[in-house]
Image: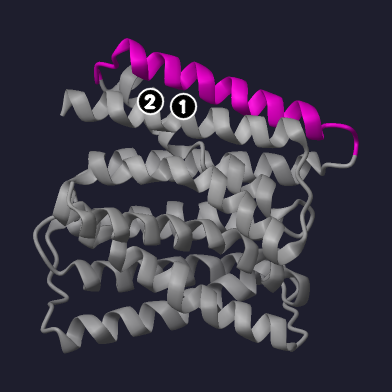
Amino acid sequence: MDIRAILVGLAFAMMWSSAFTSARIIVADASPLLALSLRYLISGLIGVGIALYLGQSWRLTSAQWRATIIFGILQNAVYLGLNFVAMQSIEASLAAIIASTMPLLVGLAAWLFLGEKLRLLGVAGLIAGVVGVALIMGARLDGSVDMFGVMLCAIGVVALTIATLLVRGATSGGNFMMIVGLQMLFGCVTLSLATLLFETPRIDPSWPLIIAFAYTCLVPGLAATVVWFWLVNRIGATRASTFHFLNPFLGVAVAALLLGEKLGARDILGVFIIAGGILAVQISRQKQS
């Protein structure tokens, strides 16, 4: 892995992790499903516009269309939609920690259901991930944590795991920027329907809302996706996924820095254990590929 790929991977991890803090700011002044559907409308149109400028086509393969629809619904609408709703009542750091378990769940599901072999190091990583989550949740389950919000985040990360497994390799074949834009527009349509069914739309304009919304549209929403595709094309999906081990650290660090969220000793220990588990699982899977 060259130095350029390492720097890009670090940038991706920072952008992905910061999304939880910006989401927490957004839902303080806007209803979550409306805000997220508007985000995907803007990011999706920009993505499609860039794709057309680059000469990319709407004519996707059947596998690409399947990946676009699955990711648009499961990742953009279900995973992020539930996280946005949850962050009305739980801290961004906790949402980031739950979401960061996705590589562990992917490794576990691939091992149990897809016949992917997992070395002893990978099994140890899965166990470490469970221990880390148990430490953090045990420290926080004192009556002050909204368990409904935690449940929404857990359902969301399962949806993201399913989407990741269903579309592995399906986005290859070019037109990646078009796929990114269309995924977001599918997410926008799904979330717009959910807004009409489940939410009373609300927007209270403020400078924190405007800044956080613009940042979310352009950085985690669009730039991080483009950077991820570049990284996968450069070093492969398995090696690129190794950078997810940084997400627990960065997610809680950004939330603590910008939102003043407090972390106890058990939180910090749990984050280290989860990050180590993610790294172990990814290294184990990398040796198999």
Please provide percent x and percent y for residue 273. Answer: 56, 27
From the viewer's perspective, is residue 104 above or below residue 14? above
Judging from the image, what secondary structure is the residue with disc 1 in? helix
Quarter holding residue 227: bottom left
| 136 falls in the magenta region | yes
> Dominant secondary structure of the magenta stretch?
helix
Q: Residue at x 51, y 42 (%)?
A: 100
- Location of the C terminus by quadrant is top left
Q: Is residue 161 visible?
A: yes
Q: Is residue 35 left or right of residue 72?
A: right
How would you rate the neighbour count of disc 1 (Cα within 10 Å): few for under 14, some for 14-19, many for 20 or more?
A: many
Q: Badge 1 is on which residue?
A: 277
Q: Which residue: 58% across, 52% down?
A: 251
Q: Secondary structure at mark 2?
A: helix
Amino acid type of the residue tagged 1 in the rendering: Gly
User: Label 2 belongs to which residue?
Assistant: 280
Give, as a single range, the part of the protein colored magenta. 115-143
Q: Amino acid at mark 2?
A: Ala
Choose top left, top right, bottom left or bottom right for residue 53: bottom left
Disc 1 and disc 2: Cα gap in Å? 5 Å
> Going 64% across and 86% down the picture, which residue do you hit?
210
Q: Nearer the viewer, residue 214 or 113?
A: 214
Q: Viewer-proximal residue, 99 or 160?
A: 99
Furthest residue toward right: 143
Q: Which mark is residue 45?
A: none
Q: Are marks 1 and 2 in contact (CB under 8 Å)?
A: yes
